[in-house]
Each structure stands twice: as structure tokens, then as C-alpha cells.
Amino acid sequence: MKTFCGRANPTTGAMEWLEEDENYDYHQEIARSRYADMLHDKDRNVKYYQGIRAAVNRVKERGEKAIVLDIGTGTGLLSMMAASAGADFCYAVEVFKPMANAAVKIVEKNGFGDKIKVINKHSTEVTVGPDGDMQCRANILVTELFDTELIGEGALPTYEHAHKYLVQEGCEAVPHRATVYVQLVESKRMWSWNKLFPVHVEAEDGEKIIVSPSEMEDCPGVPSVCDIQLNQMPSSDFTILSDVVTMFSVDFSKPVRSASTSYRVQLEPVKSGKAQIVLSWWDIDMDPSGMINCTMAPYWVKSTSAFQWRDHWMQCVYFLPNEEPVLQGEKVYLTACRDEYSVWYKLQKARGEEENKAAVHVQSPVCRCQAHLLWNRPRFGQLNDQNRTRQYIKALMKVLKTDSVCLCISDGSLLPVLAHYLGAKQVQQYATFFFFKFFKANNLEDKIKIIEARPELLTSSHLEDKKISVLVGEPFFTTSLLPWHNLYFWYARTAVTSHLTSSVTVLPQSASLHMMIVEFQDLWRIRSPCGTCEGFDVQTMDDMIKNSLNFRESKEAEPHPLWEYPCKSLSDPQEVLTFDFRKTVPEYSLSTEGSVNLLRKGKSHGAVLWMEYHLAAGISVNTGLMQISNEKGNCEWNPHCKQAVYFFSSVIESETLLDLPSAVTYAINFNTKTGEITMDFKL
């Protein structure tokens, strides 16, 4: 059966109706899932297996049958571990139907069909009794329901329900407990992901400073956690202000409460500074004694010898509502509040005991200024990047004249303000209501006109019957996922053609797509088949992911922020396509074929693609590779943008330089009707 799905095309801006297979959503979810990453997480798997063996032994030593409940079984891996450790029976619960079907096949294939029952339900719908899904309550509870924030996938309400209705009192639990740790830091880099810093502009009539509205300065931001690979954050980018302390822990073998609550710890700053950020991570003890421990601690807390790369669990960055000055040795209180699914923090000076207690429960942060809803964290970082802003200022100074009538097409951009300060006669911008507050804070509300009509609906009355002489864009659009989605600027430019002067200046004047072959240090694992995991055959899972990846006729590139995922270049970067914004979007497709030589030995895991925007002669901004930093080919990437990664379906390995230069051939096509880029690589 086919179904029609509506979507706004991120590149062309058009509303489209696509005919999709009814399982389209399943395929999307499976293809982009993190199952492979979890199965490759050796540390996690070994520790779970050790914990499960120990729990089964403890139950058997009491002379009881070992009945296991495994919630969120996925591939059935943890249930198979329990069965092979001697459990008498396992109930494996999995709500996602395609996954539950795969688990049934994997369990059968590994010979545990008589010991494991897969239940395709949400655990809160599972029934117990002679006619129920489970014959009796379990005495061992095994789960893997955690995300980077620990509780974001609903672990607490799931455990709360399981203890009430599905497991015996005093049951064994694997993991036995989880502990959340925090550390207070100052970091201009991380703080730049949450607040807009003043922008300095050298104009003809002196220095101008662009400032934020006061509501933005005081806004606590959004409650969603910022989860990143903190191990890629150099120690020079933050200053540690406190020791690592335990914030709270949860014992999973006892009844769990999911109701909102708060925890408070006293911190003694080890250094004076501005407290801006709470860094946080957790560990899990698989056994009551804490001998089997799996930790997410970053590199400066634990020795790297124990380091296990994983992408399904990372570390958390929490932004305090405001930066607070702290003094070395002068105690402060850190409060963590949580609801069922998220955590947030507040810092208070250590005053009288009673006064502090009164103010403990803090409301979940709600963005009041709209900026945190309009700009995500990398976007804040991008707007705060002074080097990038300087490039736009340089380019605008080149193209603006005193009689310039300027239109800006970009989401939530500071370009109109820059254009006004640099001397444009009239500036118009597509913007949301938030920008009115922004202009007001800078006394520009009567200087820059906000247009709310879409580009294709623009009329001369919107422009007060004037023609546009300078069309500018960064370009940046909130709907863009892949680098080339920002080519929407080209489509918008085409839509407003009739409103442009014949000698219009378009900034950027053009864009180019670049590509490079790389070897990833770790990211390859998320798309790599597992085969066997801790001795269990999970090939069925590999086949299912492969089938979903192949569901689309052509494989697609996927967005990743590569500053978090080290890789080395095996080829030189190559420009593969150019887009001339001075002309309208052509009717025909743009395509290219060629080959790229491999210059370094290594495993060719895939190609990375990114855009470069040529603002004006000799001035450009790059959204991808900043530099190849050494002869080993280690890459530095633009930290504010996601790059596109196309994983090769087979990896070629050139171990010796004798194999070089082998080449990778490519064919890349930009369909101007659909705005989609398709690509094919042959090794």
C-alpha cells in the first residue's frame, strides 16, 4: 500500500506531496538508528553480560528460578545473555514492531526460542497472570532505556511501572544503579552556544555595537539538553571551577519514583571565575557492589586506557540561566531539578540554610525571548564567530553604495543590521516578530523593514515600488539539514528576479560544493555491520539496516558535526559543482563526473561534502574543512555547521603506499527541479 506524505522541500521551498511506501517511516527510523553503534560498544556489552551472569547466579543461589524481564530488548541481545547465563525464562519487551520481528528471528537463530518470549508491546501494557503476556512476575529486571541525559527516553516512568506491576519486590536489577555527576566550568566557547555576544562594526561614522534585547540577556533558554562528544573539546576551551561531585543516583532494584523532584549539593570552587556551564555525565553499576561499572566520564576525569568510543551515550552541557561570578573557596549551592524526562540546573550563593531551602524548586527553563527557538546552539556559535562576521563586513563594504536598496534573504540573520550600519540607504529583511525586538534594542525599528511575505509572493508594494540593487544572504535557513539545502537562497533569488535592478549585486555571488575522501577514527561504527556480538549472531539486524538504507533508490548522505568525529583525509579536497547566484536557477540539472586520487594509506570509509560561499571577489566563507592540520591528514572542521557524510557500502583499504594512487570515481547530480543532490562513488 502507498501513502501520500506532505513535506516542505528544504532546498526549493516548495510544498510537495510524495508517494511513499507504507513502511517508509520504519525504514527511516531503522536506517538512521543507533543499533549498530550499541552493538559495537564492547565495553557496554561486556559489562551487561557480567552483570547479568552475576544477577542470575545470585537468584539461583537463593534456590529460586531465574525469571527475567528485559524491557526495550532491541535485538534480544540482553535476553540471550540471560538465557545463556542459565536464566529459566526471559520475557523480552519491544514496542517497535520491525525490531520486535527481528528479535524473534535472532532469538530463534541463536537457539533460544524455548527460553525467550518476545512481547511486541509497550512495557506499561504488558499483563501478568495465567492468561497474560507473562505467567508470573520476574525476579530479574534487565533494561537499557538510557540516553545521554539518562532519563530522556522515559526510563523513570518505565521503572516505576515495572516495580508496581511486573517484577517481584526485592528483585535483582541490571544495571543495579545509575549515578549522575556534575562539574562547574567557565567556557566562552560553550557559552557562545546560548547567548549572543555584542557584535562590533567599524563603520564610516565610527564604531557601532549590535546588542541583544534585554529579554534575550535574561532568558534561561530551552530545556533540551545539549549532548556532545565532550572528549573532542580541548581543555584550552574551558576552565574547571569545581571538582566533580555526585549530583544524584537511582537504585533500580527498588521502587523508582518518576515525579518531579530536585537535588542540591554544596560546591567549593577550586578557582575563581564565571560559572556558566554545568558539565554532566553518568555511570551505571551493573551489580550491587559497584565492581562492574560502565562510565561516560570524559577524558580529563578517567584515564584514556579505559576509553570506549560511543555515540548513543555522550556527555551533557547545561547552560546556567545566567553566568554567576564565583570565588575560590567560597561555597555555592548547585540545584538539579528534574521531571520525568529532563534535568536543569541553578546555582545559588550559600546563604542562610532556610532562605536557600525556600528557593529550591526551579521552574523548567522556558525561552521567553524567542531567539532560542529561532536559533539552535550551533547557530548561536556561528553568529558569535567574529572571523566569520568580519568576512561579511568586508564583502558588504565592497558592494554597498549610499543609494543601495538592500533585501536580505536568510533566517534570523544579522546581515540587515550590518548593511544598515555600513551605509545602505534602505534595508528590508524576511524576519520573524522576534527581530522587531532586536531592531528596537539597537534603535533601528524605523530603519529596517520586516517583510513577512514569502519570496514568490513578494509584490512591489512590499518594496515601496523600489527595485532591489543589493540582494544578500548568508545563506542560512532553519529548515536546512544538509549543506546544500541552503541553496534555497538561489530559488528565492530566482523568485524575486522581477524586483531586482538589471545591475543587481548578489551576495554571495556564487557557491561551490566540495568533497574529500576520509578515514574516520570511530564514526564508521554507526554504519558498520556487526555479524556477531558477544558470541551471538545478530546478522538479521545487519540485514534489516542494510535493507532500510537501500530502501531509497540512491543512498543518501547524512549530516554530522565532524568537529566531534575525528577523521583523516585520504585525498585532497576537490571542488565538484558550482552554483552561480548572479543567474537564476537553470531549467536543466547540474552534474559532474570525475575521479579523486587517494594520497594517504588508510581505510576509505566515505566522502565528506560541504559548501563554500563566495561572497565577493576574494572573500568567502567555508562551512566544511578549515584545514588539514598535519602530514597525517588530520582535519579541522567548521564547528558551527554539519557536514554531509556519504558512507561507502564497502570499505577499501590501502595499507601500503604501493597501492597508491588508487582513485575513487564519482558522479554527482543536482536536480534543479527537486533541489536534491544524488551521488554515486566507485572504489
Image (cartoon, rainbow, N blue to C red):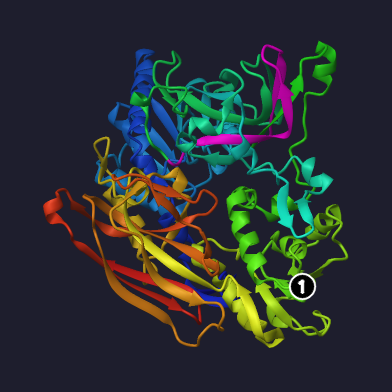
The residue that appears at 56% across and 21% down in the rendered structure is 254
Q: Is residue 300 above or below residue 222?
A: above
Q: Count all numbered tags in the image, as a single digit.
A: 1
The residue that appears at 21% across and 50% down in the rendered structure is 601
Expressed as whole percent of the image width and height from the top left, the position of residue 195 reads 70, 43
The quarter in which the C terminus is drawn is bottom left
Q: Is 395 situated left or right of 95 in this image? A: right
Task: Answer with the quarter of the image where residue 51 lies.
Answer: top left
Note whether residue 625 is visible: yes
The residue that appears at 34% across and 18% down in the rendered structure is 57
Q: Alpha-carbon neighbours of circle 1 within 10 Å: few (<14), some, or many (≥20)?
A: few
From the viewer's side, name the closer residue of 437 and 308. 437
Which amino acid type is shown beneath numbered disc 1?
Answer: Thr
Task: Answer with the quarter of the image where residue 256 lies.
Answer: top right
Provide the residue designation for mark 1. Answer: 402
- Element assignment for label 1: loop
By secondary structure, the bulk of the magenta-drawn segment is best described as strand
**Which stretch is magenta?**
311-340
The residue that appears at 84% across and 13% down in the rendered structure is 354
Expressed as whole percent of the image width and height from the top left, the position of residue 585 reads 54, 82
Expressed as whole percent of the image width and height from the top left, the position of residue 202 reads 72, 54
From the viewer's side, name the closer residue of 518 and 180. 518
Q: Is 359 situated left or right of 101 in this image? A: right
Task: Answer with the quarter of the image where residue 473 lies.
Answer: bottom right
From the viewer's side, name the closer residue of 381 and 645. 381
Give yes or no for residue 147 being in the magenta stretch: no
Expressed as whole percent of the image width and height from the top left, the position of residue 514 reads 41, 64
Give yes or no for residue 337 being in the magenta stretch: yes
Q: Is residue 194 above or below residue 166?
A: below
Residue farthest along the left direction in this orientation: 658
